[in-house]
Image (cartoon, rainbow, N blue to C red):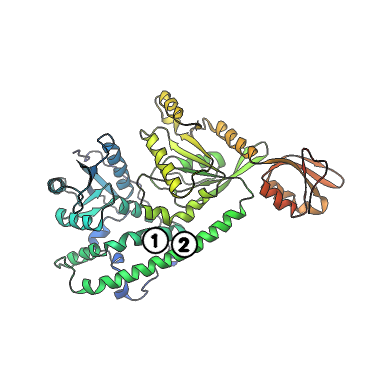
Amino acid sequence: MTKRGNNKRQSDRTADARDEADEIDEYAEGNEAETPVADRRTDDEATFEFGQQDLARAVLFLVSTRGDDDIEERFDELAGLCSTAGIDAVATLSQPREHPTPSHYLGKGKTEELAALISEVDARVAVCDEELSPVQGRNLEKALGVRVLDRSELILSIFASRARSKQARLQVELAQRQYQLPRLRRLWTHLDRERGGTGALGGMGEKQIDVDRRLLQERITSLRRRLDEIEERKRREIKTRKNEFLVSLVGYTNAGKSTLMNALTGAGVLEENRLFSTLDTRTRRWELGEGRHVLLSDTVGFIRDIPHKLVRSFHATLAEALESDLLLVVTDASDPCCQERVDTVRGVLDEIGAQGKDMLLVFNKIDALEDRGELAILRSRFDESLAVSARSREGIDALVSAVRSRLDAASRHVTLVVPHRLASLHQPIREQVSVLSVDWRDDAAHFEVLASPSVLEHLVAKGIGVLDDSSSEASSD
């Protein structure tokens, strides 16, 4: 059991005010009685929302079923999540067990010990490193007398605070509503306690809980329908870019993906040293030199035990990775849990159906390594990897060269014969292919290019001829 009182983790709690005109809560407009309990936050619950001025003091707890060697790492990551959400982790408690108890997660003695620790450090919230069942959460709150958060609820609150686009807000809300649906009884207990009731489901709560369940189910159905529409539109948008070679940055949260994207493209993407700073996919043109370029996308970061509902709801955002020609799996080389982070990312990629994709492992932040020997050991565990520093640009040239080699392998080396009557296509050609040279002739411009088969098919349909190295005549429609 460790105290963290003198090592408080402050978070950057700045968050943009939400534009009320773009709010996506639609049910029961103008009808307070038809507002689900999940939206009727009590003053006590609101204290723990992201961005509060005063950090809530918290005790972290977990059951260790995987051995003792990763307990401190789990607590460190959970404390980081708490800090991001505006919660100050001041103490920790763990219990080794084969499995959590169905009723309280912890055993009876440890639950009493946790209650005493909460009182001792004057904590106002207890945070569990795993997802609690509705029964476990309700029983723990009754036994501890404070608000109990689990890992899923904590991550969802962080995602909600980070969501900026309408798509991201819808995705987060869907995951939140799915999380809330089986926990309505516990939410009503909060309201009864605030009103001075007995905490049992009587009176108004008994009448409203079925209404709340119906409203939440209707909202979930509506959100799924709207996200399906967004996903289809996203799929069409990505399809229009399939003429380009697509590269996506994927990796554990805070691995430096946005910093790397800025180093590679000069995109000006916001860089923050905090978890989940990127929720919305950003795509930029990446010039590789020698007339070559690709499209590079930055995606949402992954994390251990990310709520499955959140993975499913963010499928539209992750679609960018699914459609990519190459995935750059970025990991923080200075992270003591680097190997585990890579395993987590690969697990999530498998979950969303990205197994079999061409992947290149990129160890970032090598400038933060005190011992480069550790890096050599890490790299020896993988078939192919590169080591870079997005900050100092060390290793960037090697990364560019590796991506350029993959682009060349996926491209055909041909000559495009563009009649002068199609001169308006010169600029679109330069945007879609890698131009190696141009030969201006009397009847047409001859572009020596590297291009994907899909791009060539598109250009031929527009009346442009294509000469292979072995061909003597151009083919065109």
Percent across and percent down for residue 386 are 51, 32
Label 2 sits on residue: 227
Percent across and percent down for residue 452 are 66, 45
Disc 2 to disc 1, C-alpha distance = 9 Å
| Tag 2 and tag 1, C-beta contact below 8 Å | yes
Let me know if residue 218 appears in the view. Answer: yes
Q: Would you say 72 lies left or right of 220 here?
A: left
Q: How many marks?
A: 2
Q: Residue at x 58, y 34 (%)?
A: 402
> Which of 144 and 211 lies nearest the eye of the viewer?
211
Q: Residue furthest right?
A: 442
> Which of 317 and 265 lies nearest the eye of the viewer?
317
Q: Quadrant of the N terminus?
A: top left
Percent across and percent down for residue 264 are 55, 39
Q: Would you say 435 lies left or right of 224 here?
A: right
Label 1 sits on residue: 174
Please tell me which of labels 2 and 1 falls first in the chain. Answer: 1
